Image (cartoon, grey):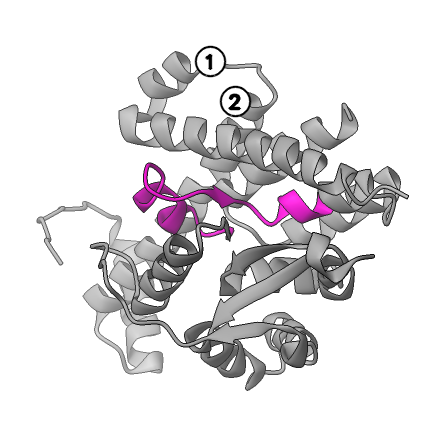
């Protein structure tokens, strides 16, 4: 995994609290923060993309607008999923009709 | 229903789990032949070891295993960046010239120009138009299938819901 240095300045009080957590859990302070940060970033990203996906899927925002906000790759992926979902429904509807009683 | 009027489809684990959550496997078997690989059955067996939602669903799906056609596949063409099981399913679908039913977006994107893929919602709507499921029940089941999904799954859900409502 590629990594990059990211420095944070935090209050002394927060640092003392972190030391207490690390001591009680017998873990490395840096590792604990790294894991918590990774979890929080993953959840927040998913939550925000859910909201953006809602707007896009309901036609309230265009692919170009999505691209401006989060970049080309995610905009392309949203467009792909929306089109695939529509196509799946349309083809499924056609397939089911041949079994209509 | 004439057995030979049912089309064959290759199902991956994600699609079987989605349809299993909706308890639709028996109904799907009424209108299609479920083709899959031993790799998918192994993945379901792995899920089934756990007592969570996916474990329970996997056990439910595996009850219908005898009705599936489980193929042994030689991988003749390997696609990069997808799993061995997905490569097996791709080769199976290609050999038989049939679509793959999957909710795995990564798989869909990697084989988009070389194979036909549909999300599992294909069958949700096929069951509506074949009069085996009401639109209201299908929307209720779609809600169930959506639970705990990520943002990608959420787009499948909303786009499918909009399409089903307009049927």
Q: Identify the residue under disc 1.
A: A62
In the figure, B23 relative to B114: above or below? below
Q: Is residue B112 left or right of residue B134?
A: left
Residue picked out by circle 2 = A56
Work out whether residue B17 or residue A25 is closer to the camera in this orientation and state it.
B17
Q: Is residue A69 left or right of residue B130?
A: left
Q: What distance separates the C-alpha of mark 2 from that of mark 1?
A: 6 Å
Residue B56 visible in the snapshot: no
Instruction: Write the residue at 31% across / 55% down.
Output: A38
Label 2 element class: helix
Tell me the chain of label 2. A
Q: State yes or no: discs 2 and 1 in contact (Cβ < 8 Å).
A: yes
Q: Nearer the viewer, residue B25 or B45?
A: B25
Can residue B134 be seen in this snapshot? yes
| Residue in view at x 74 percent, y 61 percent | B3
x, y (%) of residue B96? 44, 56
Question: Which quarter of the image is occupied by the C terminus of chain A?
Answer: top right
* Residue furthest bottom in the image: B49
Quadrant housing the N terminus of chain A: bottom left
* Residue B49 in the image, given as x and y percentages of width and height: 55, 86
The residue segment tinted magenta is B102-124
Q: Quadrant of residue B130?
A: top right
Most foreground residue, A21 or B67? B67
Q: Secondary structure at mark 1?
A: loop
Q: Please report the residue visible at 37 percent of the width from the left and 13 percent of the height from the top.
A: A64
């Amino acid at each position: 995994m590629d990594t990059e240095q990211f420095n944070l300045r935090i209050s002394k009080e927060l640092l003392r609290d972190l030391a207490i957590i690390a001591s009680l859990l017998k873990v490395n302070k840096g590792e604990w923060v790294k894991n918590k940060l990774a979890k929080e970033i993953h959840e927040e990203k998913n939550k925000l993309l859910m909201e953006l996906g809602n707007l896009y899927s309901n036609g309230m925002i265009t692919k170009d607008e999505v691209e401006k906000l989060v970049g080309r790759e995610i905009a392309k992926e949203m467009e792909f999923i929306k089109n695939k979902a529509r196509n799946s429904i349309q083809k499924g509807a056609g397939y089911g009709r041949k079994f209509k009683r | 229903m004439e057995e030979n009027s049912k089309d064959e489809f290759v199902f991956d684990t994600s699609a079987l789990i989605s349809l299993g959550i909706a308890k639709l496997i028996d109904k799907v078997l009424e209108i299609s032949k479920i083709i899959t690989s031993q790799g998918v059955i192994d993945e379901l067996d792995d899920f089934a070891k756990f007592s969570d939602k996916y474990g329970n669903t996997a056990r439910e799906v595996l009850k219908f295993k005898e009705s599936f056609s489980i193929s042994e596949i030689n991988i003749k063409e390997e696609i990069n960046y997808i799993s061995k099981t997905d490569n097996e399913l791709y080769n199976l679908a290609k050999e038989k010239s049939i679509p793959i039913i999957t909710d795995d977006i990564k798989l869909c994107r990697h084989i988009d120009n070389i194979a036909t893929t549909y999300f599992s919602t294909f069958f949700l709507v096929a069951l509506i138009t074949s009069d085996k499921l009401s639109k209201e029940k299908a929307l209720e089941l779609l809600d169930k299938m959506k639970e705990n999904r990520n943002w990608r799954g959420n787009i499948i859900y909303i786009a499918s819901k909009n399409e089903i409502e307009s049927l």
